[in-house]
């Protein structure tokens, strides 16, 4: 008998068990019309996207035949145009990243590590986790600051080689490929190109701070099988104070709503000391009211005051047991049933 979490993540589990084709595989078999005009490309993308869910649900492995120009190719072509005037994330710095670094300090994607991660949530392990360097956030307490704030720390791996590694890991028993960082958002074009070259059927996880632009959310629809979000802050401006990101709440809530319609989802929330009332409770209340009480939520208590946490007095300590218990009990009081 399936657990409540397995039911909520049922599509992900079916792909993981090779009972159905991944969204990447389905997108690669949908024929699309090519154009050099950006507006025409987007019109074609949205035409296909509007009917993608029905195609995805009706497609079997026997149907996978790649046309000359596919929906996945269309996504890549649009991402190439965005890359030249970058608005992958909500910062929208509009820098030509073929020649310069963006606000995220990322130009060419660099990878800090890739391995079979056994420390993630139970439904996704063993997870083939690929850590990118660089990030569009500047969290003063970043738990991965050694890679997120030092984009030159990684190594360059071309798309075909990484695709071979992903296929190899899948054959070794990975349940998914898990793109994280830093943050995967600055590296979207590279990720799209890499997955086009993979042969194995594998669920794709987008492990992100969820500060993507609306356009990127549309590109991820029909590509990502499971969204693993890091929902950090409530609506009171803590995002700008602690991570230097404006308009955090409106952007991230919009993106969660869009993600909920396009794939399965696990939401992570790291409890910050002194931020129970302004962040933890508003986030959990919003999830219960907007995404449903079956939404899988991981309330995380492993915050530690690292990097430059001393710059904000309230986060220079660990969260107390009382704070963690209060957050968990509040989630239960809201009726959230899939707490990890």
Image (spheres, grey):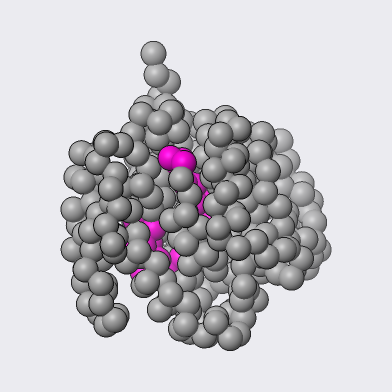
Q: Which residues are magenta?
A: 200-221
Determine the residue positioned at 37% across, 71% down. Answer: 77
Rendered-image quadrant of the C terminus: top right
Q: Can residue 236 be spotted in the picture?
A: no
Q: Is residue 319 left or right of residue 95?
A: right
Vertical comparison of 41 with 193: above or below: below
Instruction: Count up the numbered dots.
Output: 0
Is 150 colored magenta in this rendering?
no
Is 203 colored magenta in this rendering?
yes
Determine the residue positioned at 39% across, 13% down. Answer: 1
Vertical comparison of 327 with 52: above or below: above
Nearer to us in this view, 275 or 99: 99
Nearer to us in this view, 47 or 135: 47
What percent of the width, then of the height, locates residue 211?
49, 64
What percent of the width, then of the height, locates residue 99?
58, 86
Nearer to us in this view, 173 or 276: 173
What percent of the width, then of the height, locates residue 245?
56, 71
Determine the residue positioned at 77% across, 49% down. Answer: 304
Location of residue 298 by image quarter: top right
Q: Can residue 317 be spotted in the picture?
A: yes
Vertical comparison of 252 with 271: above or below: below
Determine the residue positioned at 43% across, 28% down. Answer: 17
Nearer to us in this view, 56 or 289: 56
What percent of the width, then of the height, locates residue 148?
69, 63
Q: Is residue 236 left or right of residue 146?
A: left
Vertical comparison of 221 with 173: above or below: below
């Amino acid at each position: 008998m399936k657990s409540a979490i397995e039911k909520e993540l049922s599509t992900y589990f079916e792909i993981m068990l090779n009972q159905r084709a991944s969204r990447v595989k389905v997108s690669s078999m949908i024929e699309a019309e090519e154009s050099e005009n950006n507006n025409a490309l987007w019109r074609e993308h949205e035409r296909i996207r509007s009917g993608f869910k029905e195609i995805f649900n009706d497609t079997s492995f026997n149907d996978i035949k790649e046309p000359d120009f596919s929906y996945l190719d269309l996504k890549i072509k649009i991402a190439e145009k965005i890359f030249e005037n970058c608005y992958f994330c909500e910062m929208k710095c509009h820098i030509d990243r073929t020649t310069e670094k963006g606000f995220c300090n990322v130009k060419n994607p660099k990878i800090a590590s890739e391995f079979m991660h056994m420390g993630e949530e139970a439904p996704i392990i063993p997870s083939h986790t690929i850590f990118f360097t660089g990030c569009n956030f500047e969290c003063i307490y970043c738990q991965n600051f050694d890679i997120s704030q030092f984009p030159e720390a990684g190594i360059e791996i071309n798309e075909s080689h990484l695709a071979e590694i992903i296929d190899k890991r899948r054959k070794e028993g990975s349940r998914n490929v898990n793109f994280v960082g830093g943050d995967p958002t600055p590296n979207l074009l590279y990720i799209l190109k890499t997955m086009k070259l993979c042969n194995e059927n594998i669920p794709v996880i987008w492990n992100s701070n969820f500060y993507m632009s609306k356009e990127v959310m549309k590109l991820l629809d029909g590509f990502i099988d499971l969204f693993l979000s890091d929902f950090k802050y409530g609506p009171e401006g803590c995002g700008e104070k602690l991570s230097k990101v404006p308009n955090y709440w409106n952007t991230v809530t919009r993106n969660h709503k869009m993600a909920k319609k396009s794939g399965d989802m696990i939401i992570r929330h790291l409890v910050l000391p002194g931020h129970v009332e302004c962040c933890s409770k508003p986030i959990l209340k919003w999830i219960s009211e907007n995404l449903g009480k079956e939404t899988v939520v991981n309330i995380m208590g492993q915050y530690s005051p690292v990097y430059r946490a001393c710059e904000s007095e309230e986060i220079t300590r660990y969260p107390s047991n009382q704070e963690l218990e209060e957050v968990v009990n509040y989630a239960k009081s809201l009726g959230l049933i899939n707490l990890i």
